[in-house]
Image (spheres, rainbow, N blue to C red):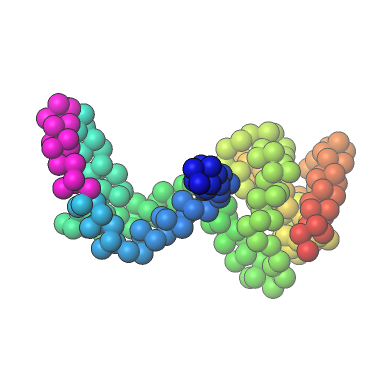
């Protein structure tokens, strides 16, 4: 009997460890979709541990002050403040997203799609393609190895009618400076022979990956 209990406990523990992320995600979803229950639970927790909490606050006045200030400044804190202007909050969220690595890529993808559509090219590219491309280029400018201000470039220029998926893969990654320099030149006019060979290898890797996806 006792053995069974221990085994059950161990089984539960193992199950939790194995599925930790899934369980935490589900719990979070549940609390988010049941704010009343969460509020009640928080309230009950406070009532149960009131003495301890008040004592802690008394003993750590500076720390509590500091944390409150920090919380009020955070997005979550601002949102919980009913007086706070939500349009400012929204602006802040958008700004944060636009400067995040994912936001930057998504925005560039939008511009690229718009440009392709304008030229009536067939746009068959998504964020996974771009992420894979960035990985293959090691998140560096293909021309000068710079790591900032990276842009999506048409290896064969769009101005000459080549779409981003021309012959399966026409994506280059260049920094802003190099992209401006390359402009509407053909690869042969801009890159060395080594670079052209390197591009072919990257393209092969991409096409192989793409094949695996489908
Ligand atoms: Zn560059």
Q: Is-magenta flag for residue 12?
A: no
| Foreground residue among 145 and 134 | 134
The outermost residue toward the front is 1
Q: Establish if 188 lies above or below 79.
A: above
Overall secondary structure of the magenta stretch? helix
- Residue 160 in view in this figure: no
The residue shown at (72%, 70%) is 122
Report the residue that reaches farthest toward the bottom.
120
196 or 48, nearer to the observer: 48
Image location of residue 195, percent across then percent down? 82, 38
Q: Is residue 154 visible?
A: yes
Residue found at x 52% / y 53%: 22
26 up-or-down from 120: above or below: above
Residue 183: give x, y in percent of width and height: 69, 49
What percent of the width, then of the height, locates residue 96? 41, 49
Report the front residue among 160 and 123: 123
Q: Looking at the picture, how far across and down is residue 39, in whole percent?
A: 24, 57
x 82%, y 59%: residue:
211
Q: Is residue 12 left or right of residue 124?
A: left
- Residue 53 is covered by the magenta coloring: yes
Q: In the displayed structure, would residue 189 be above or below residue 27? A: above
Q: Quadrant of residue 38?
A: bottom left
Does residue 175 appear to the left or right of 100 in the view shown? Answer: right
Query: In the figure, residue 31 lies in which quadrant?
Result: bottom left
Q: Quadrant of the C terminus?
A: bottom right
Q: Say whether residue 167 is left or right of residue 21.
A: right
Residue drawn at 65 percent across, 70 percent down:
117
Which span of residues is magenta-colored? 45-62
């Amino acid at each position: 009997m006792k053995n069974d209990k221990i085994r059950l406990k161990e089984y539960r523990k193992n199950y939790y460890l194995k599925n930790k992320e899934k369980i935490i995600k589900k719990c979070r979803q549940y609390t988010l979709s049941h704010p009343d229950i969460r509020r009640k639970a928080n309230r009950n927790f406070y009532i149960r541990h009131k003495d301890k909490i008040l004592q802690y606050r008394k003993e750590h006045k500076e720390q509590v002050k500091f944390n409150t200030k920090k919380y009020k400044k955070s997005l979550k804190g601002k949102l919980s403040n009913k007086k706070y202007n939500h349009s400012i909050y929204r602006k802040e969220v958008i700004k944060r997203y636009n400067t995040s690595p994912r936001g930057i890529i998504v925005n560039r993808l939008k511009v690229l799609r718009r440009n392709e559509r304008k030229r009536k090219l067939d746009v068959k590219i998504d964020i996974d393609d771009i992420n894979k491309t960035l990985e293959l280029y090691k998140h560096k400018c293909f021309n000068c190895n710079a790591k900032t201000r990276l842009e999506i470039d048409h290896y064969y220029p769009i101005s000459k009618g080549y779409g981003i998926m021309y012959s399966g893969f026409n994506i280059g990654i260049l920094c802003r400076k190099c992209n401006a320099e390359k402009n509407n030149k053909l690869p042969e006019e801009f890159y060395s022979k080594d670079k052209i060979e390197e591009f072919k290898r990257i393209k092969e890797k991409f096409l192989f990956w793409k094949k695996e996806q489908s």
